[in-house]
């Protein structure tokens, strides 16, 4: 009986406190993850703009300290690191095309300084953006000549 009562109490607590149902009975994310998913959505929309912790917290009606601590705990990096990685990844993808110059790509992805963009890109990928574009061009050029 004790084991049965324990299991009933456990599942009631699980249902009521840990996995609350939303409208229509669907399972909502845990309360503690909701603000972080909102932060991630905000970053996906605004990463090209100047992003400060105060701006994000203000627009999402969150505490800067709680938002930062929860983000690092759940994502494993700071908000600033995440934004920089997002900008770098988008820049790297755009370097695969010749439609935009490296300078245009830098400015379109929220990097204010060319030297900072080049330094961060090189630290993450081992080569400068220009060298990366050249290596992509050589790779595609070699593939096309083999066809």
Image (cartoon, helix red, strand yellow):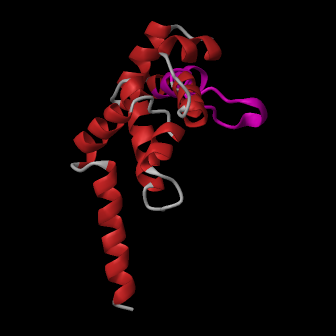
> Which of these two is toward me, 79 or 49?
49
Q: Which residues are magenta?
A: 7-32
Viewport quadrant of the N terminus: top left
Q: Using residue 92 as the reference point, say whether residue 33 is left or right of it.
A: right
Residue 141 location, quadrant: bottom left
Q: Residue at x 48, y 15 (%)?
A: 53
The image position of residue 30, as x and y in percent, is 54, 27
The image position of residue 37, as x and y in percent, is 55, 30
The image position of residue 32, as x and y in percent, is 51, 21
The image position of residue 126, as x and y in percent, is 21, 49
Q: Using residue 34 as the reference point, say whether residue 88 is left or right of it.
A: left
> Which of these two is toward me, 75 or 50?
50
Viewport quadrant of the C terminus: bottom left
Q: Residue at x 45, y 55 (%)?
A: 93
Q: Residue at x 77, y 31 (%)?
A: 23
Q: Is residue 50 magenta?
A: no
């Amino acid at each position: 009986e004790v084991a049965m009562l324990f299991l009933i109490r456990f599942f009631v607590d699980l249902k009521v406190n840990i996995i609350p149902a939303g409208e229509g009975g669907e399972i909502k994310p845990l309360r503690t993850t909701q603000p972080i998913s909102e932060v991630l959505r905000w970053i996906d929309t605004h990463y090209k703009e100047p992003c400060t912790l105060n701006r994000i917290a203000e627009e999402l009606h969150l505490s800067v300290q709680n938002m930062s601590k929860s983000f690092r705990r759940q994502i494993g990096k700071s908000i600033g690191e995440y934004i920089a990685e997002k900008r770098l990844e988008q820049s790297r993808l755009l370097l695969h095309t010749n439609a935009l110059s490296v300078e245009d790509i830098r400015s379109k992805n929220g990097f204010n300084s060319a030297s900072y963009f080049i330094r961060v890109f090189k630290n993450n990928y081992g080569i400068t953006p220009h060298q990366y574009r050249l290596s992509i061009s050589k790779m595609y050029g070699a593939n096309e000549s083999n066809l």
